[in-house]
Amino acid sequence: MTNPILACPLCKAPLAPINNSLVCEAKHCFDRAKQGYWNLLSVQQKKSLDPGDNPLMVQARSAFLDLDHYQPLAAAIQHILADELQQINSAQILDMGCGEGYYTSQWQQNLPQHQFLGLDISKHAVKAATRRNRDISWLVASGANMPIADHSLDVLSVLFSRLMPEPFARALKDDALLILVWPSANHLVQLKQALYQDVKTSSYDPIAELNPLFSLQSEQQLNFDFILEQADHLQTLLLMTPHGQRINDDTKASLIQQLPITLSFSVNIGCFRKRAQPV
Ligand SMILES: C[S@@+](CC[C@H](N)C(=O)[O-])C[C@H]1O[C@@H](n2cnc3c(N)ncnc32)[C@H](O)[C@@H]1O
Ligand SMILES: [Zn+2]
């Protein structure tokens, strides 16, 4: 599947499909992987040889998300999308930092009249996403330099990923919607308390960071508890979070002893609109 809004990440000219490649008028050429995704990350753009989430993290995230503990988040965003897109026949929605596609895939299946794109800098994540759903344009690309024509998106969603205000503003239509999901202080607090002597509060303030280019239209918090009963489920959750990279064997063993454990899911969902003039 190709998408007419794709633009060359090197020169921004439109990309046209030729055989199994996308080519711009300057003859920059990007291949389609055999799995079906487009690799639009040129060597010049890569800061590391294999950027983004590694295979182990991707596999853990897939296994954990497939348990559906986080399904209420997929449903909450789908509700926002359905509401926003009521008047649009075939909207362009891009999920930036889509990971292995758990959320993007569900939205596409439930809102198939719209065009969904999933973009991630990790080719391992995008490969896994391609296995989930073939009706989405999956892109290996950088969010800082999205291969998307200027002012072409109706919605940009960013769940637990990087905030890049200027590229987001460039890709969105003027009246379009930016949906941002970020953890609140209470998110997985029980894990943090078990892992760290002193749980620090994050200074991350996306509303302030976005403020020059985007105004906050609405904000809600999604809170619920879920129970983990099995050691392998806990293990996958640890592996997909930054905490998992830091945990030692003794702490892991002590957490496993505490099973079943109740964990708090707590995220902020912010809906933003582009400002007519930066402030
Ligand atoms: C915590 S994961 C979240 C994945 C997915 N949104 C979810 O909630 O399951 C963050 C994702 O952002 C991706 N990422 C990090 N930096 C990126 C960048 N500069 N451009 C695009 N994706 C990026 C990572 O590879 C990873 O898949
Ligand atoms: Zn080009």
Image (spheres, grey):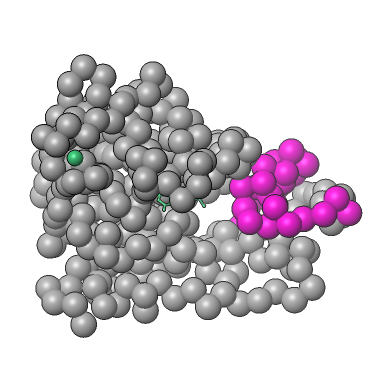
Q: Is residue 142 magenta?
A: no
Q: Quadrant of the N terminus?
A: top left
Residue stretch rendered in magenta on the structure: 225-250
Quadrant of residue 278 within the rendered picture: bottom left
Where is residue 61 shown, x and y percent of the image? 57, 42
- Is residue 232 visible from the viewing direction of this image? yes
Q: Residue at x 61, y 77 (%)?
A: 201
Left of 193 or right of it: where is 102?
left
The stretch drawn in magenta includes residue 229:
yes
Indicate left or right for 215 with 70 as reference. Answer: left
Q: Is residue 92 visible?
A: no
Q: Considering depth in this image, is 158 or 39 the residue closer to the camera?
A: 39
Task: From the image, give the main secondary structure of the stretch colored magenta.
Answer: helix
Using the image as rendered, state which of residue 61 and residue 30 is in the foreground. 30
Quarter of the rendered image showing ligand 2: top left
* Quadrant location of the C terminus in the rendered image: bottom left
Q: Residue 186: horizontal and vertical position, in percent?
A: 60, 69
Question: Within the image, what quadrant is residue 261 found in?
Answer: bottom right
Which residue sits at x=21%, y=54%? 171
**Total of numbered circles in the picture?**
0
Residue shown at the point (35%, 63%) measured from the top left: 164
Q: Nearer the viewer, residue 130 or 188?
A: 130
**Whether residue 129 is situated above or below residue 166 in the rendered picture:** above
In the displayed structure, 100 sits above or below 208; it is above
Name which residue lies at 74% across and 38% down: 232
Q: Measured from the top left, where is residue 98 in percent x and y? A: 41, 45
Residue 219 in the figure: left or right of residue 242:
left
Task: Give percent across and percent down for residue 4.
Answer: 14, 35
Residue extending farthest to the bottom is 279
